[in-house]
Amino acid sequence: MAKIQVFYDYQCPFCKKGYENLIELLPDYKAVEIEWRPIESHPRPENYSPHTDLCIQGFYIAQELGADISAFHALMFEAVCKEKRNVEEPEVLADIIQGIIDREKFLNLLKSQKFASRVNENNDLAYEKEGIWYVPSFRVISPEGRRDLKLDAKGGVGVSIEEMKNFLDIITKIL
């Protein structure tokens, strides 16, 4: 089985489209496992809004509570990219996801900062170790630990569905 790390930011419209394309293609690639790695395109202390660090923590909370991750992603992309909701406010974030996660459990875990370190860990992995400049970005982790197979977005363009399909085809043939 091939494992792909997907680096993305909920405030990035190219990531939203990349996510939608990947979800559309995945049913044809049953031998591909996804490891979601949410990051911030412009991490703090950059003065760029909205910061999605609470969304990232929310992803890990959703995962821990057994929520539907596809539904979580869809809600986050919709709220941030399309509706321009203020996801820097915990209460707003709790309102967005309340249909898939218990609101009080979510707010308590968010307040606990249990997953706060994951924001910096993912950002460091993307920017310092993987050399990612644009998102969405895809890294294959082979069973042997090889990490040379990758697909990176182009600035202001993203990744097309054709590029993604070709990438998935190559992975499934090699691994």
Image (cartoon, rainbow, N blue to C red):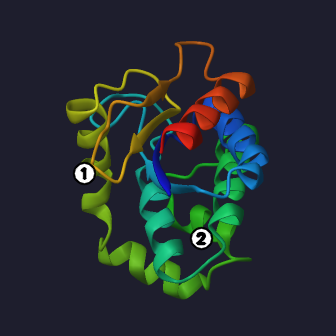
Which residue: 69% across, 32% down? Answer: 165
Residue 31 higher or lower than 95, as above or below? above
Q: Position of residue 125 (x, y in %)?
A: 26, 42
Which residue: 28% across, 50% down? Answer: 144
Between 74 and 85, the one lying in front of the other is 74
Label placed on residue 121: 1
Crowding near pointer 2: few (<14 within 10 Å), some, many (20+)? Answer: many
Say which of marks 2 and 1 sits in front.
Answer: 1
Residue 28 higher or lower than 173, as above or below? below
> Residue 72 sits in which quadrant?
bottom right
Which residue: 74% across, 77% down? Answer: 99
Q: Position of residue 168 (x, y in %)?
A: 61, 37
Marks 2 and 1 close (CB-CB < 8 Å): no
Q: Secondary structure at mark 2?
A: helix
Q: Position of residue 46 (x, y in %)?
A: 32, 29
Crowding near pointer 1: few (<14 within 10 Å), some, many (20+)? Answer: few
Which residue: 49% across, 38% down? Answer: 174
> Residue 115 sits in which quadrant?
bottom left
Label placed on residue 94: 2
Between 19 and 45, the one lying in front of the other is 19
Task: Compare marks 2 and 1 and give the one earlier in the sequence.
Answer: 2
Q: Position of residue 18 (x, y in %)?
A: 66, 35
> Residue 164 sits in which quadrant?
top right
Which three-letter amino acid code belongs to the residue tagged 2?
Ala
Per the model, the C-alpha gap separating discs 2 and 1 is: 23 Å
Residue 59 higher or lower than 158, as above or below? below
Q: Secondary structure at mark 1?
A: helix
Compared across the picture, whether 109 is left or right of 119 comes to right
